[in-house]
């Protein structure tokens, strides 16, 4: 797993590490690692035109030192100092010794650059870029150069990923010592591009992480494939209450994604039985209420079921049971009206709201999505999967995951129903695997995102495309083949 840290945690680790090292060692390690990544991206240094956007402090120093490395290898390097009086003296001297030079904003050459390094603001920055810096960032984005952020795109909050105004639009971010949360969540995810982690020796000084990101290998290790002794009951039995006469598709999509994920058996007990039976003859369709469906290891309840009194009664019946339950869509609306249905449960419960549903349950999400998901989980004593560009999953104990997979094409009707079915299938295997609910939900988001990437490889997708690509997505995870499409923004280069 990839550990995600706050700026405070990273600064504390840096302070502890510096106490054991010679002055400047961490900065030299960072510059060396950053230079190696830049050279790998460019393929060469000689004759390459590099522009450094340099602010005050250590972030600017890292940028100047790597400029010296590249200049020493034959690159033409110009540095634009946004605060000349506070520029890092050692880094500036190293740049000049290597043949780099200081330039003004007007003659920086951003319109001709091969590489632009953003060292304007580091992890201690707050708020968006100031006007002069914002103009430089816009000019860099309009030019031909490869845009690389040093440690963190300037203007991005290191902890939350929030952007208040303008931020540097990096294509790559080279971050030092630890991955900052703001690189993979919120608006920061879209500003970071592909994230490269450079080890500068902070590992022994970092705390055990409570926020993480799954890799493909992590996800695969948490989905147990069938063995020679498996049968349809040992694979997990999922119950689905979704869809209605008005919205039969929700039942079809939710049932289909559950079938295609992992379980040996899916029991459908909603009011769209005819459509589900026609689409998925593999499902066991029950006419009647959930209690008539037979034994299950987990329920999925809510998509398209309605919010009338009958729907509330069905939800209460499901939540009164003794198995894990995924609560989505219409069921979330009902829980917002009757939170005691979830708060009083002593079995795993997973809520899967998008931002508007979350607001009805817990109030506005706000700029810190990790904190919001944790707040909701603690309030109702459950697990919350907060859907979005970078989905966040949090447990009541504070354990959290930020999802790394997906595509904006998933923002279409029905894909949430698909995610619920995947989550239900994984929760149904808990008895056999012992997988914690928060991890099962994180794997569900990961798999859903990978299937979405595959479905979107040729262009726009619909929810049924995601269902159809689930076997391929899971197969690739088990084989270690990764996605067929490009990685999502804010993805750490594994």
Image: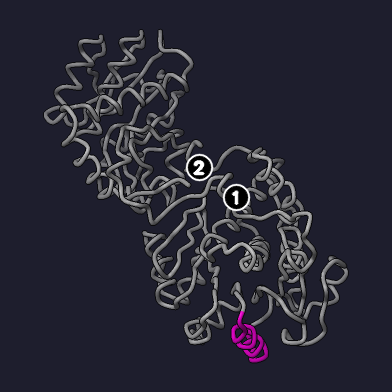
Magenta stretch containing residue 127, yes or no?
A: no
Our reading of the magenta stretch's main secondary structure is helix
Residue furthest out toward the left: 85
Q: Taking 34 as reference, is 227 left or right? A: right
User: Where is residue 118 shown, x and y percent of the image?
Assistant: 33, 31
222 or 89, nearer to the observer: 222
Cβ–Cβ under 8 Å for marks 2 and 1: no
Front one among 342 and 466: 342
Residue at image point 36% right, 33% down? 199
For label 1, the crowd category at 10 Å Cα-Cα, with few meaning under 14, some 14 to 19 and many 20 or more, is few
Q: Is residue 377 visible?
A: yes
Can I make out residue 164 in this image?
Answer: no
In terms of sequence position, does the residue under pointer 2 or pointer 1 come before the other?
1
Distance of mark 2 from mark 1, alpha carbons? 24 Å
Disc number at residue 489?
Answer: 2
In the displayed structure image, the side of residue 309 where residue 160 appears, left or right: left
SS category of the residue bearing label 2: loop
Identify which residue is drawn at 45% across, 13% down.
44
**Which of the two discs, 2 and 1, sits closer to the camera?**
1
Indicate left or right for 270 with 308 as reference.
right
Within-10-Å neighbours for mark 2: few <14, some 14–19, many 20+: many
Magenta-span inclusion, residue 316: yes
Tell me: 108 left or right of 339: left
Stretch of the chain drawn in magenta: 307-322
Residue 417 in percent (x, y) is at 66, 66
Observer-nearest of 4 and 143: 4
Q: Position of residue 107 (x, y in %)?
A: 29, 18
Q: In the structure shown, which secondary structural element does the residue marked by tag 1 occupy? A: helix
Residue at 60% across / 50% down in the picture? 221
């Amino acid at each position: 797993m990839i550990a995600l840290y706050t700026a405070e945690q990273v600064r504390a680790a840096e302070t502890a590490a510096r106490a054991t090292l010679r002055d400047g060692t961490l900065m030299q390690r960072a510059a060396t690692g950053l230079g190696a990544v830049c050279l790998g991206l460019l393929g060469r240094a000689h004759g390459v035109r590099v522009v450094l956007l340099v602010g005050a402090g250590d972030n600017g120093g890292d940028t100047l030192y790597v400029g010296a490395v590249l200049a020493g290898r034959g690159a033409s390097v110009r540095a634009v100092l946004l605060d000349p009086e506070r520029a890092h003296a050692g880094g500036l001297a190293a740049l000049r010794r290597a043949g780099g030079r200081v330039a003004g904003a007007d003659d920086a050459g951003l319109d001709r650059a091969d590489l632009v390094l953003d060292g304007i603001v580091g992890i201690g920055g707050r708020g968006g870029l100031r006007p002069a810096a914002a103009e430089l960032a816009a000019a860099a984005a309009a030019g031909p150069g490869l845009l690389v952020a040093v440690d963190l795109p300037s203007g991005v909050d290191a902890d939350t990923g929030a952007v208040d105004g303008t931020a540097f639009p990096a294509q790559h971010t080279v971050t030092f010592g630890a991955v900052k949360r703001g690189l993979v969540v919120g608006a920061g995810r879209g500003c970071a591009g592909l994230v490269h982690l450079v080890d500068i020796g902070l590992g022994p000084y970092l705390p055990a992480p409570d926020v993480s990101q799954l890799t493909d290998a992590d996800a695969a290790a948490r989905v147990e494939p069938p063995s020679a002794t498996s049968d349809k009951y040992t694979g997990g039995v999922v119950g689905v209450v979704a869809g209605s006469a008005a919205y039969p598709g929700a039942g079809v999509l939710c049932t289909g994604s559950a079938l295609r994920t992992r379980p040996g058996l899916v029991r459908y007990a909603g009011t769209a039985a005819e459509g589900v039976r026609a689409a998925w003859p593999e499902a066991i369709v029950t006419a009647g209420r959930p209690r008539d469906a037979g034994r299950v290891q987990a329920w999925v309840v809510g998509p398209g079921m309605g919010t009338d009194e009958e729907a509330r009664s069905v939800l209460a019946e499901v939540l009164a049971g003794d198995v894990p339950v995924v609560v989505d869509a219409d069921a979330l609306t009902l829980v917002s009206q009757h939170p005691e249905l979830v708060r009083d449960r002593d079995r795993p419960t997973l809520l899967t709201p998008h931002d508007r549903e979350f607001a009805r349950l817990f109030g506005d999400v706000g700029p810190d999505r990790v904190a919001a998901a944790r707040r909701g989980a603690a309030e109702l004593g459950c697990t919350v999967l907060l859907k979005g560009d970078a989905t966040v999953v949090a447990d009541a104990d504070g354990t959290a995951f930020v999802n790394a997979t997906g595509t904006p094409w998933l923002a279409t009707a029905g894909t949430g129903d698909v995610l619920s079915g995947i989550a239900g299938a994984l929760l149904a295997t808990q008895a056999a695997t012992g997988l914690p609910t928060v991890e099962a939900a994180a794997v569900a988001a990961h798999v859903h995102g990978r299937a979405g990437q595959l479905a979107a490889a040729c262009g726009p997708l619909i929810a049924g495309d995601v269902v159809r690509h689930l076997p391929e997505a899971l197969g690739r995870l088990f084989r270690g083949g990764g996605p067929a499409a490009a990685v999502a923004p804010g993805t750490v280069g594994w």
